[in-house]
Image (tube, helix red, strand yellow):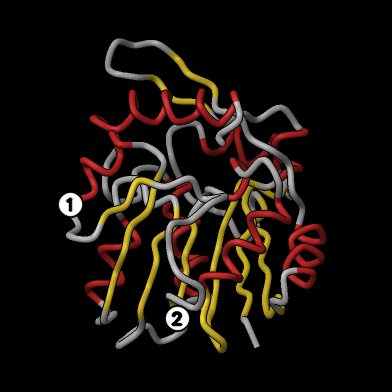
């Protein structure tokens, strides 16, 4: 069952879907995608799941890089309609409709903060990963949220929506992965003015104000 906050997020993503591009559409997402791709294994020939796929940006990259099977899963029907990939499944990421060991690789971009229970999310990903399989995920950094940054967007009717987002730091991810039988192999934090140095309108003021603040985290875990 999806909790009320998750239902609110699904509705928000349905509203966002018609204008949500299938590629990194701002400097933060560009930096996130670069960090995720640096953690990717060689995916050619693998069975891959783009978890919380949105409009399918990672699914498309998986196809381009030769994954044998690519499945996109998302709770938002609106996002799935925009995904443009053959295998699309509407699914709650806490209760995936896939058999155990179904995938060799799972990627989850900017989604785990929507999970109401980090441990349950890790267990579900571990369940669908085959032995030797790999998980790469990213999320907005909890320190950025504590500093006052929010996840929000403006829909086609110019209404602003704020997305419910839980705060899980890298240590919590490592502990949850371990309890789920996964080994966190690598983790990265993207800090303003250090790993995140992109230019955009107002970026000089942004970098001065937030220098050193972690905005994003990315990590890779493996199932032994």
Mark 1: give few (<14), some (14-19) or many (20+) Cα within 10 Å: some
To which quarter of the image does residue 120 belong? bottom right
Q: Which mark is residue 33?
A: none
Q: Which residue is mark 2?
A: 104
Q: Indicate which disc residue 84 carries.
A: 1
| Residue 181 falls in image quadrant | bottom right
The residue at the point 49 percent across, 75 percent down is 38
Residue at image position (60%, 35%) is: 206
> For the residue labelled by badge 1, is the local secondary structure a helix, a strand or a loop?
loop
Is tag 1's residue or tag 2's residue first in the polypeptide sequence?
A: 1
110 to the left or right of 76: right
Left/right placement of residue 106 relative to residue 46 reads: right
Q: x%, y% of residue 196?
A: 57, 54
Residue at horizontal 37%, vertical 83%? 43
Q: Please rate how many residues cluster around mark 2, counting C-alpha atoms within 10 Å: few if below 14, some from 14 to 19, many from 20.
A: many
* Picture coordinates of residue 162, whole percent (x, y): 54, 22
* Mark 1 or 2, closer to the camera: 2
What distance separates the C-alpha of mark 1 from that of mark 2?
Answer: 22 Å
Query: Split into 4 quadrants, where in the image is the N terminus?
Result: top right
Which one is in front, 196 or 175? 175
Position of residue 131 measured from the top left corner of the image (x, y, whole percent): 56, 87
What residue lies at 45% left-to-right and 65% top-to-bottom?
A: 34
């Amino acid at each position: 069952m999806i909790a009320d906050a998750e239902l609110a997020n699904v509705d928000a993503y349905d509203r966002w879907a018609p204008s949500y591009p299938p590629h990194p559409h701002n400097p933060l997402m560009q930096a996130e995608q670069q960090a995720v791709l640096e953690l990717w294994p060689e995916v050619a020939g693998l069975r891959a799941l783009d978890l919380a796929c949105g409009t399918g940006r990672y699914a498309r990259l998986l196809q381009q890089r030769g994954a044998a099977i690519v499945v996109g899963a998302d709770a938002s029907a609106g996002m799935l309609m925009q995904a443009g990939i053959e295998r699309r499944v509407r699914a709650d990421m806490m209760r995936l409709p896939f058999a155990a060991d179904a995938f060799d690789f799972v990627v989850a971009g900017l989604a785990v903060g929507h999970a109401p229970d980090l441990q349950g999310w890790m267990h579900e990903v571990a369940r669908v990963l085959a032995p030797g399989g790999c998980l790469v995920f990213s999320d907005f950094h909890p320190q950025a949220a504590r500093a006052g940054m929010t996840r929000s967007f403006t829909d086609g009717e110019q209404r602003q929506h704020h997305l419910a987002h839980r705060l899980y730091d890298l240590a919590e991810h490592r502990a949850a992965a371990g309890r789920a039988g996964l080994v966190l192999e690598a983790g990265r934090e993207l800090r303003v003015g250090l790993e995140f140095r992109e230019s955009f309108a107002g970026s000089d003021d942004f970098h001065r104000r937030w220098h050193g603040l972690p905005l994003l985290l990315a990590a890779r875990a493996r199932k032994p």
